[in-house]
Amino acid sequence: MAERTGVPNPPTLESLVAQLRHENPHARWEAARALGVLRDPGAVEPLIEALKDRDPDVRRKAALALARIRDPRALEPLEVCSAQDENQVVRWAAAWGLGRFQQRKIA
């Protein structure tokens, strides 16, 4: 049906996870952003791995995506990232993400 209407098929979890390993950092951070929008718990482990990406924008988007998903498996990696990442903006994104977990407990 997508071919008939001209509307592309939405990306799948699998295709986005594969894109996290793309050579282009823009493609990787776009995949991390999209995984956050998708909010599929199946994306948590690949996003945790993306917190170690060589590109700070990818790490930042991965931290923000994990904050949107709010899976408890992300707590410790976000804590480590917020304390140890070399990039200040990435540390801020991870800390902000941890704050989202706290909001969930309060709400």
Image (cartoon, grey):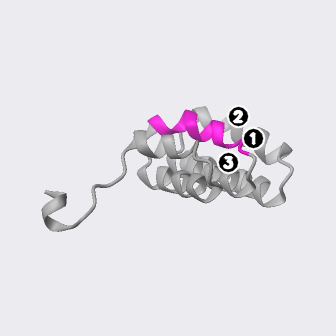
In the rendering, at what x and y percent does residue 4 appear?
13, 63
Amino acid type of disc 1?
Glu
Which circle marks residue 79 in the picture? 1
Residue at x 45%, y 35% (from the top left corner): 42
Residue 106 appearing in the image: no
Q: Secondary structure beneath disc 3?
A: helix
- Does 104 appear in magenta? no
In the rendering, at what x and y percent does residue 33 appear?
53, 56
Amino acid type of disc 2?
Glu
Quote the CA–CA distance across marks 2 and 3.
Answer: 9 Å
Residue at x 54%, y 49% (from the top left corner): 104
Outermost residue on the front side: it is: 23
Dividing the image into 4 quarters, which one contains the N terminus?
bottom left
Amino acid type of disc 3?
Leu
Q: Write down the residue under mark 2.
A: 76
The reply to whether dot 1 and dot 3 touch (C-beta < 8 Å) is yes
Q: Secondary structure beneath disc 1?
A: helix
Quote the CA–CA distance across marks 1 and 3.
Answer: 7 Å
Between 90 and 6, the residue placed more toward the observer is 6
Residue at x 45%, y 56% (from the top left corner): 37
Query: Mark 2 or 3 closer to N-term?
Result: 2
Outermost residue on the bottom side: it is: 6
Q: Which stretch is magenta?
A: 42-53
Q: Quadrant of residue 8?
A: bottom left
The reply to whether dot 2 and dot 1 touch (C-beta < 8 Å) is yes
Q: Write down the residue under mark 3.
A: 98
Query: Mark 1 or 3 closer to N-term?
Result: 1
